[in-house]
């Protein structure tokens, strides 16, 4: 089989909409009968996923793989950076952590990762007909010139034509597109095959003089003006578009919950290094729950249920909880009977103590945790990453015994239960999580905990709304939204020209 055709989407800046454009193009190609895979050589995100082999990768490429109708795998994102501070990140290569580095250390180290990038790209190109590559940030960052493993260097390795997109919603789109082209080197400029304007609201005819100017100034075609797509229920790189949340559920369920008259106030601590924010999409979308992030202790005061999310820096964020007064408020609320659920790093914080003798998470050595679960966590160099499915075995009024939870683990450290805690879940891989003696404080390592309809219906029942939720076909909802995205892009882009650029005729 010949190597796959390639095309690359780069942006004038971060958040230009590259991720969704790649997902939409992947969907179009899949609909048209091509086997297609996404690829992003280097991703920086705390929103990660464990593939079927237990390798860690960015969730953006998971979304793109879903849109293409294929299983996600780490070759689609061979290098993942997970920020641990303002100047440092954990570096994950081919799904496994290789160390935590400062920005300068990584700047000197990263060119050695080109081999890993090339290997992953070649594996995909040997299996699929088309690989759609997403860049990172901007290709015109002159301070990274000569140290690029995410944009034009990758385009050269893949021999990929490049499309550059600009975000008109932020303003200055013409200047950013022209400026990007001006700052590219001659050989890089020759690789660019077209321009795209993204997130447009309004009458396209008003843009025509600007589009004519762009084409003349850059000597490139404008391949489309993509509208701002409202209420698109597809995960984005750093947020999730779920404005029309209640529409996910059948009308009879919404009416039954509304008739009950009870809204459960769920408040999640907004940690500085919060990771895997998509853990709360289903909870926020389910009728009957009022979900909000709390920025300070006062934001937790009205909570019926408190959630402590996962974090890339457990000890640092636990210190934040103590110093901000949020820890004291969580403890006060829990002792007065307010349920508390912690996920991943949040689960570790609920214990009595966190030990880090090798300085894996920080130099603290150890730190007092919240003391709401009889659990002690010890950090070690090994990282646990795997998909898991479990059954609730603890006696807890929050969840029905036998409730099913499916998700994935990504964490450093192992938690050991004391006599005052009971095992929460039994999975194929063993035990997971813990419950307090009264069953009102729960902790689990499973990301995706709230995606279980058993969990949501159990919580609603505990708070006085015994509505049996139907099995929500989240996959069908995603498929509908990927098709909707593809329709929007087919209408907005010159797909005939893009096919020609790819070399598919």
Image (cartoon, helix red, strand yellow):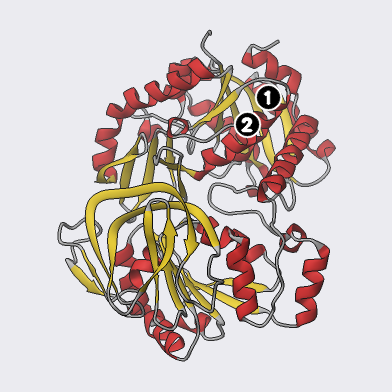
109 is higher (above) or lower (below) than 406: above
SS state under label 1: helix
* Residue on which the image places disc 2: 68
Element carrying mark 2: helix
Residue 54 is left or right of residue 231, and the answer is left
Image quadrant in which you'd find residue 263: bottom right
Q: Residues within 10 Å of mark 1 (few under 14, many from 20)?
A: many
Neighbour tally class for label 2: few under 14, some 14-19, many 20 plus, Cα within 10 Å: many
Please identify the quarter of the rendering in which residue 255 is found: bottom right
Residue at 42% from the left image edge and 85% from the top image edge:
329
Report x, y in % for residue 20.
Answer: 63, 39
Q: Check the image and report above or below for 181 versus 271.
A: above
The reply, left or right, for residue 362 in relation to residue 163 is left
**Distance (Cα) linking label 2 and label 1:** 8 Å
Relative height, residue 333 to residue 222 (above, below): below
Query: Which quarter of the rendered picture does the C terminus lie within?
Result: top right
Q: Nearer the viewer, residue 147 or 111?
A: 111
Number of labels in the image equals: 2
Q: Taking 447 as reference, is 50 above or below it?
A: above
| Pointer 2 with pointer 1, Cβ within 8 A | yes
- Nearest the eye: 172 or 265: 265
């Amino acid at each position: 089989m010949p190597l796959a055709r390639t095309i690359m989407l780069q942006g004038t800046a971060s958040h230009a909409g590259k991720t969704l454009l790649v997902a939409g193009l992947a969907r179009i190609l899949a609909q048209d009968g091509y086997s297609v895979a996404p690829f992003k050589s280097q991703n920086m995100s705390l929103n990660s996923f464990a593939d079927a082999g237990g390798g860690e990768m960015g969730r953006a490429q998971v979304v793109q793989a879903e849109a293409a109708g294929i299983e996600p795998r780490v070759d689609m994102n061979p290098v993942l950076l997970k920020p641990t501070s303002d100047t440092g990140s954990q570096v994950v290569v081919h799904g496994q952590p290789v160390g935590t580095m400062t920005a300068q250390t990584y700047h000197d180290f990263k060119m050695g990762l080109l081999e890993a990038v090339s290997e992953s790209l070649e594996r995909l190109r040997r299996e699929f007909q088309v690989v759609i590559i997403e860049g990172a940030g901007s290709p015109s960052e002159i301070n990274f010139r000569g140290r690029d493993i995410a944009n034009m260097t990758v385009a050269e390795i893949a021999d990929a034509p490049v499309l550059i997109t600009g975000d008109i919603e932020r303003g200055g789109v013409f200047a950013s597109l022209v400026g990007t082209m001006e700052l590219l080197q001659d050989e890089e400029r020759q690789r660019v095959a077209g321009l795209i304007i993204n997130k447009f609201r309004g009458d396209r005819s008003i843009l025509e003089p600007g589009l004519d100017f762009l084409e003349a100034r850059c000597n490139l075609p404008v391949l489309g003006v993509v509208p701002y797509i409202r209420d698109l229920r597809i995960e984005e790189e750093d947020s999730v578009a779920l404005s029309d949340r209640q529409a996910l559920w059948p009308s009879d369920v919404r009416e039954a919950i509304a008739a009950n008259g009870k809204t459960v106030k769920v408040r999640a601590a907004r940690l500085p290094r919060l990771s895997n924010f998509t853990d709360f999409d289903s909870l926020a979308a389910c009728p009957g729950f009022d979900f909000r992030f709390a920025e300070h202790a006062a934001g937790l005061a009205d909570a019926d249920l408190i959630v402590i999310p996962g974090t890339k820096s457990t000890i640092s964020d636990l210190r934040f909880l103590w110093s901000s007064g949020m820890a004291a408020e969580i403890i006060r609320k829990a002792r007065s009977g307010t349920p508390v659920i912690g996920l991943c790093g949040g689960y570790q914080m609920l214990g009595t103590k966190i030990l880090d003798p090798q300085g894996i998470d920080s130099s603290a050595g150890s730190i007092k945790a919240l003391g709401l679960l009889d659990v002690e966590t010890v950090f070690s160099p090994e990282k646990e990453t795997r998909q898991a499915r479990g059954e609730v075995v603890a006696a807890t009024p929050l969840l029905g015994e036998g409730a099913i939870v499916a998700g994935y683990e990504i964490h450093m450290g192992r938690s050991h239960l004391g006599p005052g805690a009971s095992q929460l879940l039994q999975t194929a891989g063993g035990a997971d999580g813990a419950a307090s003696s009264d069953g009102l404080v729960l902790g689990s390592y499973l990301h995706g905990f709230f995606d279980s309809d058993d969990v949501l219906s159990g919580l609603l029942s505990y708070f006085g709304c015994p509505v049996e939720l139907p099995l929500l076909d989240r996959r069908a909802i995603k498929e509908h939204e990927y098709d909707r995205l593809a329709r929007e892009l087919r209408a907005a882009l010159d797909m005939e020209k893009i096919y020609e650029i790819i070399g598919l005729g």
